[in-house]
Amino acid sequence: MPSKLTICGRDINVRGRILRIATIEGDKYRFLDDPQSVVAGLRECGTRIDLFTFMQRVSETTPKYEYPVEWDNFAVLPITTFDNWWNKVLGFKGRNKAKQAEKKGIKLREIPFDDVLVEGIWRIYNECPIRQGKRFPHYGMPLEKVRPYAGTFLEDSVFIGAFFNEVLIGFAKLTIDETRTQAGLMHIVSMIEHRDKAPSNALIAQAVKSCADRGIPNLVYSNFAYGNKQTDSLSDFKERNGFQRVNVPRYYVPLTWMGKNAFGFGLHHKLIERLPEPVIAKLRDYRADWYSHKLQLSQQK
């Protein structure tokens, strides 16, 4: 588990045993307008931190600061109106999927963060241990831990529920940044049992509407690409719904000699991120086969 501290009113997470890397709480959903004061606070906090990393907003694609920088990316859907997205941006397949959800009885609405939602999220999390060919990290999460996990940034978040026969079968959490220029999909998960009803497509459609109603010009669905992995079923899903890749600066501020050398040699990245894409694809296939076999065995018991 990462350690936590507070600097200049910002919660900071520090991870790693050998190389200690710090990020602000809500990295990719929260941003710094005065990073210099946070960097100064980290240098003086008394806790060893080797690297501090942060990134710029979608609307800020040119580097603003003189810290060491690499390029990160977001999956971004620019929004003017819902009708513009539905008629001019959304592809034929994505539109049919969203219509399919409505025809099969899926109902969408914004919902409060309360005990009913928390229990519904818990049921979704604990439906299946394997998702998208890998272990689902939230499977097995106790009910009492769901509320603090899903309940971050409540004052700036919007929760959307997908219901079938008035039972929650999927949800999305939109977290709006400090300038209200982008809303990030911090969570979007649906029950595998009901995937024939395309609840995730319906959740995206409602997320677009929720942003358009609030005048938020950018809907962000995490990264478009991760490391050397350029395409997969999730990136295809994003692209079909109109999301585009936007590159933004990510800064790495060395705070110790170890941080400076680690950044110079690329050791701040995981080993998997430095492997060629064909090798990574093969490893993903092995992983998917292993988890599929493991799930079949557990279901036979």
Image (cartoon, helix red, strand yellow):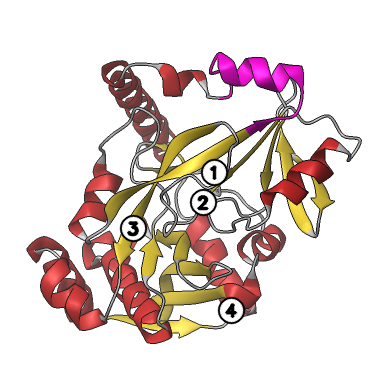
Q: Of label 1 and label 3, which has the lower sequence position?
A: 3
Q: Are marks 4 and 2 in contact (CB under 8 Å)?
A: no
The residue where tag 2 is placed is: 56
Q: Residue 288 placed where, x, y %?
A: 34, 30
Q: Residue 198 placed where, x, y %?
A: 25, 65
Q: Secondary structure at mark 3?
A: strand
The residue where tag 1 is placed is: 137
Marks 4 and 2 sit apart, C-alpha to C-alpha, by: 35 Å
Q: Of label 4 and label 2, which has the lower sequence position?
A: 2
Q: Quadrant of the C terminus?
A: top left
The residue under the point 26% across, 18% down is 278
**Circle 1 Cα neighbour tier, 10 Å, few/some/many (<14 / 14–19 / ≥20):** few
In the rendered image, the vertical position of residue 152 relative to residue 24, given as above or below? below
For the residues carrying marks 1 and 2, which lies nearer the camera in this image? 2
Indicate yes or no whether the magenta region holds residue 262. Answer: yes
Query: What's drawn in magenta, residue-wise?
Result: 253-268
